[in-house]
Structures are given as structure tokens and as C-alpha cells.
Image (cartoon, helix red, strand yellow):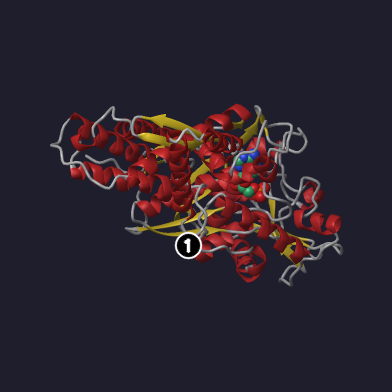
Amino acid sequence: MPSTLHIQNSLSRQKEEFKPIQEGRVGMYVCGPTVYSDVHLGNIRTFMSFDIMYRYLLHLGYKVRYVRNITDVGHLLDDGEDRIMKATRLEQLEPMEVVQKYTNGFHDMMRVFNNKRPSIEPRATQHIVEQITMVQQIIDNGYGYEKNGSVYFDTLKFAKDTGVYGKLSGRILDDLISESRDNLKNQSEKNHPSDFAIWMKASPEHLQHWPSPWSEGFPGWHLECSAMSTKYLGKTFDIHGGGNDLKFPHHENEVAQNHGACGCDPANYWLHTNMLLMNGAKMSKSVGNVISPEELFSGESHLISKGYSPMVVRFFMLQAHYSSPLDLTDEGLQAGEKGYKRLMEAEKVLQKVAHPGNGAANDLDKEIHALMEGAIDDMNDDFNTPRALGKLFELSSKINGLKDGHLNWTDLTADTWKTLQTTFHAFIYDILGLKDEMATEGGGGELVDGLMELLIEIRQNSRTNKDWTTSDLIRDKMKELNVVLKDGKDGTGWSVG
Ligand code: AMP
Ligand code: ZN
């Protein structure tokens, strides 16, 4: 029987069969970036993991509404300063200039890494009305209180009434009292240390503020996501995601707010992605192990020996399961580069073959079908990209075996051949979201292939004519460009690196 999609639900801590609320449709909300600095590779890993989930849900035929917000106000640093305000102060820009600058940079990076655009990308500052309404609902339901123009969520009352607080993160309220990570500046205004601000009165230097029943102020970060997800996906939707560093307090507080306002869980499945490390430590500015995407592409960093292309980085990231930590190392990237090229080469071979085989179904057919079904089973098993890639590699070996004459094309049935071509293609481009980096817009891939064939032919002719100057020139120039020529019994092939 074909497998069905199962996902690891942080809420139940179990792997569960995925059953959407509405048949054939999926509502998915992912916490987007806070746009006060350049997006880093850790953020990119998280958004890429959700891109894979989005792509796979689409591949399964779901109509997906994918909402990924932009946080452009209210996300405070540990010292209480709003992240956007800090960038505004340091860069001497308007708040919306900061927001636009880093939103543009974020979009550029998403495009470079071939992440699909979300269906809706709401900004917090464009949903102030919805947020004020939700704060009011929370107050009306008895779970919010006002102090000096700010409004706080009453965690103690909420926990006592509902027993829900701590459900997602597994934290116990007593522990929270001692280690509240919320805004220390306003601690004294709270009834309880684990209470958190859902509306904040703006200080005179805070440039982003709106009128509200409580003060001229701005919304709390946690509240923004609750209000925007409810607006676009309803009170309860299918999937809510983010990096696992958001589980507490951000997501725990979102759950509390949604219960506090609407009396229900916001999402049925909570998915959390794991962190990107650099040489074993969490990539962070204080450790000094940060490498920007640009440095990674150009190789201009002491942490790597050379540059790696965006698709090599994407491939490298897909070799780990989204829920495992991933260590970015030079060796790992080098291996990723080889793997990516091998896969793309197999795809090229496969798509080039014009004549389907006409054999009777045999063991090779069975093996190839089993590998294709296995790769789908792997994706159904909580989006297991590393295992699916393993199957694609086994298929690549078979494809290369067919190419170099180890296996016979005509042994395969036409049906197996066609299915292999479409499945392999769908995996590489639609599900994994890889691109052929040899290709440029407008069919450059074919152009490069055509030119390479021409050069190889000229080299062959010059060798036949004993024109060693020409043949050596072609060989040496290719070497300079990192192109390797391979002479085989079917003629000369080529690869990069
Ligand atoms: P932020 O812009 O800080 O709100 O983060 C945007 C997303 O990136 C969140 O889902 C974070 O959990 C995620 N994130 C932050 N740092 C890392 C990291 N080192 N590895 C993976 N994901 C991260
Ligand atoms: Zn969020």
C-alpha cells in the first residue's frame, strides 16, 4: 500500500499521520524574518526547510495557502530595545527604510536559493487594527491587564484556568517564574515575571507607534503572529512552523494568546526546524563564526577553502533532516558539490535518451520502481530529504550504468523508462527545488551542452589530423575552466570540477 504523509508534531511530540482540516487544502503559517539586519545562513536553512515542505505538499496535490510574515515592529532585544529601532538609530535611516532594505535583501536571498514565494506575506505594521482587536479580546476574556498604557498577558490566570501554558515547550510555570526571558525593562509593571507584553506603550524615542485604547504604542512580537495567522488562516489551521529557538517563548505565547482570544489551539501540527552550526558551534556573531551567503559564494572567508554556488549549498543543506542540527564545514560543502553534480549529470543523461527501452519487465525494472517508491516513502516520513537523496543516488548509479554500458537500455520497459524520467525530474526540480546552474535563462543549458559538443568534436578532429597544438590548446583551456574531459567507449564526455 502506498505510504501517506506523516509529520513529527511538536505539540504531541509524536509522528502523526497528516490530516488536513479541509480535504485537499492546507493552511501553513511560518514565522518570517525580523528585518533589521541581513538574513544569515541559519535563517536561510530554516526557510529552505519550510520551502521543501511547501513544495512537497504541492507535489502531493494539496492547494496550499502558505503565509510567512515580515516582522517589522515589536521584536525586542534582551535589553528592551526594538530591533528595528536599533537599526534605525545605527544606520540613520527611517524605520520603513530599514524594513524595506532588509526585506529586499531577504527576498533576493530567497530567490538565489530558489525558495518559492509564500501565498501571503503580511507585515506586522499593516495589521495594527487586527492586533488591537485581539488584545481587546484577550482583555475581555480576562487574560490581559493594562499597566501604565501597556497590556500584559496574565500567564498565571491562564495556566490555572486552562492548564494549557507550557503545552508546546514542555516548560513548567514554576521554572518560568525564575527564568523569564521577557523584556526586563518593564518587569516591574507585570503581576508575574512570566507575563508578557501584548501591547507596549511607546517611549518618546520609539518612532513606530499607533493610537490604541491603552496608549500610543506598538504591538508585542508574539501577538503579531497570532493576529496575522488568524486573519489569513482562521482560528485553527493545519501547520505552524519556525526554528526550534522560537518554541519558547514565541510559540508558547502564541498558543496562549490564541486560546486567550479565541478559546482554541491555533494549529494542529507544530513543526520546528533545527539550527545551523558552523564548525560545531551555533553560528553567531559573538562566537565569530558567521559567514555570509556572499562570502560563501565567493570563497572570501578564512572558514572555507573556496566558493560554493547557491545550489551546492542548497543540496548540502538537504543532506540533513530538518530536525537535526547541521554543521556547515568546508569538507561537507565539498562533498555536497560532488553529490549535486552527480545528481544533475544523471538527470541530464536521463532526459537526453530519446528511445525508451522495449524490454519485458525484469529485476532491473523492479529495482528501479522500488527505489522511486522508496524516495516517496522517505518524503512521506516527515520530509526525510537525506534518505530520499540516498535513493536518488542509487538511481543515479543505475542511470550512469545505463550510460556506460554496464546495464542495457533496452532491458527496461517503456513504462519504467517514462516513469523514471518524470519522477527523477519532479524530485530534482519540483520537490527538492534544485536548479541546473549550468543553465542560464532562455535555455543556456542546452547552449552550453551544444558548445561543449562542438569543442569536443574539434578536439577529436585535430587529434585525428595530428594537429596537437589545437587539441592541447582546447584541453589546457578547459582545464583552466575546471572542465574535465573523459574519454569513454561511447565518445568523450565532460564535467565540471
Ligand atoms: P529571526 O529573523 O531572528 O526572527 O529568525 C527567522 C527564523 O530563522 C526563525 O524561524 C529562527 O528560528 C530561524 N533561525 C535563527 N537562527 C538560526 C540558525 N542558526 N539556524 C537555523 N535557523 C535559525
Ligand atoms: Zn511568529
Q: Residues within 10 Å of mark 1 (few under 14, many from 20)?
A: some
Viewer-proximal residue among 454 and 144:
454
Badge 1 element:
helix
- Going by the picture, which residue comes out furthest to the left? 360
Please say whether residue 268 is visible from this viewpoint: no
Locate ligand 1 by image quadrant: top right
Q: Please give the count of numbered marks on the rendered protein.
A: 1
Please say whether residue 305 is visible from this viewpoint: yes
- Above-or-below relation of 304 to 435: above
Rendered residue at 38%/38% (across/down): 346
Viewer-proximal residue among 35 and 476:
476
Viewer-proximal residue among 96 and 193:
96
- Above-or-below relation of 312 to 64: above
Rendered residue at 51%/47% (across/down): 438
Is 80 on the left-hand or right-hand side of 401?
A: right
The amino acid type found where label 1 is placed reads Leu
Q: Quadrant of the C terminus?
A: top right
Rendered residue at 20%/41% (across/down): 357
Is 340 on the left-hand or right-hand side of 121?
A: left
Residue 452: x and y in percent read: 47, 45
Residue 342: x and y in percent read: 44, 35
- Above-or-below relation of 219 to 192: below
Residue 30: x and y in percent read: 54, 53
Rendered residue at 20%/37% (across/down): 410
Residue 344: x and y in percent read: 44, 41
For ligand 2, tell me if the residue under mark 1 lies within 8 Å: no
**Figure quadrant of residue 75:** bottom right
Q: Quadrant of the N terminus?
A: top left
Residue highlighted by disc 1: 233
**Figure quadrant of residue 295:** top right
